[in-house]
Image (cartoon, rainbow, N blue to C red):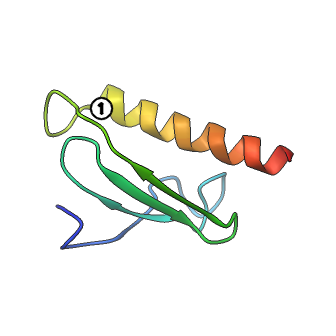
Amino acid sequence: MGYGYHWWATPHGPTGIHAGAFLAAGSFGQYVYVHPAARVVAAVQSAWRQHEDPDANAGTWALLGAALRALRAT
């Protein structure tokens, strides 16, 4: 997996806050997140201790969700 190989639809289904978003996922928590309907593009640069970290990944999704909710409130 890496930016040069694939862009991914978000794993949160066709409904919910991330509906319609997609992302490029790199190693150790690197993401480029694009949500066209919300007009949001986010680049996340992380330094996870291992290539895949489920807890850190959950934290990243929580951060993105919180950012979208905050932007919707304005």
Residue 74, horizontal then vertical, whole percent: 86, 47
- Image quadrant assignment for residue 48: top left
Q: Residues within 10 Å of mark 1 (few under 14, many from 20)?
A: few
Point 60% across, 42% down: residue: 65
Tag 1 secondary structure: helix
Q: How many marks?
A: 1
Q: Which quarter of the figure is the N terminus placed in?
A: bottom left
Question: 28 above or below 36?
Answer: above
**For this rendering, which residue is in front, 27 or 57?**
27
Residue 15, horizontal then vertical, whole percent: 65, 59
Residue 60, horizontal then vertical, whole percent: 44, 37
Point 85% across, 44% down: residue: 73
Point 48% across, 40% down: residue: 61
Residue 31, horizontal then vertical, whole percent: 35, 53
Question: 36 above or below 47?
Answer: below
**For this rendering, which residue is in front, 3 or 8?**
3
- Image quadrant assignment for residue 49: top left
Point 20% across, 41% down: residue: 28
Q: Which residue reaches farthest right?
A: 74
Instruction: Identify the residue under disc 1.
Output: 54
Q: Which residue reaches farthest left?
A: 50
Q: Amino acid at mark 1?
A: Pro
